[in-house]
Amino acid sequence: MKKYFILILSFLLFSILITGQIDQDIINNAENGDAMAQFQVGKIYFEGENIDPDMKKALKWFKLSAEQGHSQAQNYLGRMYYYARGTKKDLKKSYKWYKKAAENGNKEAQCMLGYLYETGKGITKNESQAVKWYEESAKLHYPKAQYNLAVMYLYGRGVEKDKSKAKFWFEKTQKNPETSDRLYRNCMFYLEDHFKEEEEEE
């Protein structure tokens, strides 16, 4: 019985060690200033991969990585300041980091930057800038940006109204394999509501 108890205890301790720690090589690389490793550590703490989530530690590692120009870390940092994860909500800092990530080619950040310009959150509202960043992201096949761009063309917000371009981007969004079911249905609604009569006339 005692031997059985020792085996069980050993197994539990081994499980804790396996599930409660981050790979030491990644930690060492992160502590030595490797931007990718710093991002990986931040993501592990952010998502709780084999450990309890810790937003403050995630913020710390993302910031170290972001300051070295890592676009994904910059994007996560923008998200954390926007949604108050591990820190208080700060739209100006959110804008700052989304902008850096967007300028580094991160398509998710480009879309979010467009949204910040469209809504005037953290920055002065500027719909033409919103269109610019939605377009940058849409060209990289980010479905939310494609959809937002279609809406901007449909209503002439920040750009000259152009129903043919609106239709193009709605259809592009629908064909995108990364498009969510909800976004697909939204596109279907717009296409049926605004373009069905034109198709029937043709």
Image (spheres, rainbow, N blue to C red):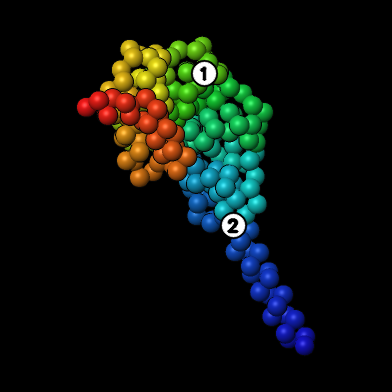
43 or 197, nearer to the observer: 197
Residue 13 seen = yes
Q: Which mark is residue 119?
A: 1
- Which residue lies at the image location 37% right of the left edge and 31% below the top edge? 192
Res 170 → quadrant: top left
Kindly give the residue lying farthest to the front in the view shown. 201
**What's under tag 1, amino acid-wise?**
Thr
Whether 150 is drawn above or below 18: the answer is above
Q: Quadrant of the C terminus?
A: top left
All told, the count of numbered labels is: 2
Mark whose residue sits in front, 1 or 2: 1
Q: CA distance from mark 1 to mark 2?
A: 37 Å
Q: Amino acid at mark 2?
A: Asn
- The disc, 1 or 2, on the residue closer to the chain's N-terminal end is 2
Mark 1: give few (<14), some (14-19) or many (20+) Cα within 10 Å. Answer: some
* Disc 1 element: helix
Residue lying furthest left in this view? Answer: 202
Q: Camera-side residue: 128 or 28?
A: 128
Who's the residue at 72% across and 75% down the image? 9
Residue 162 percent across, percent down from the top left: 30, 17
Residue 186 sits above or below residue 17 on the image = above
User: Measured from the top left, where is residue 179 in percent x and y?
Assistant: 40, 41
Q: Which mark is residue 50?
A: 2
Element under label 2?
loop
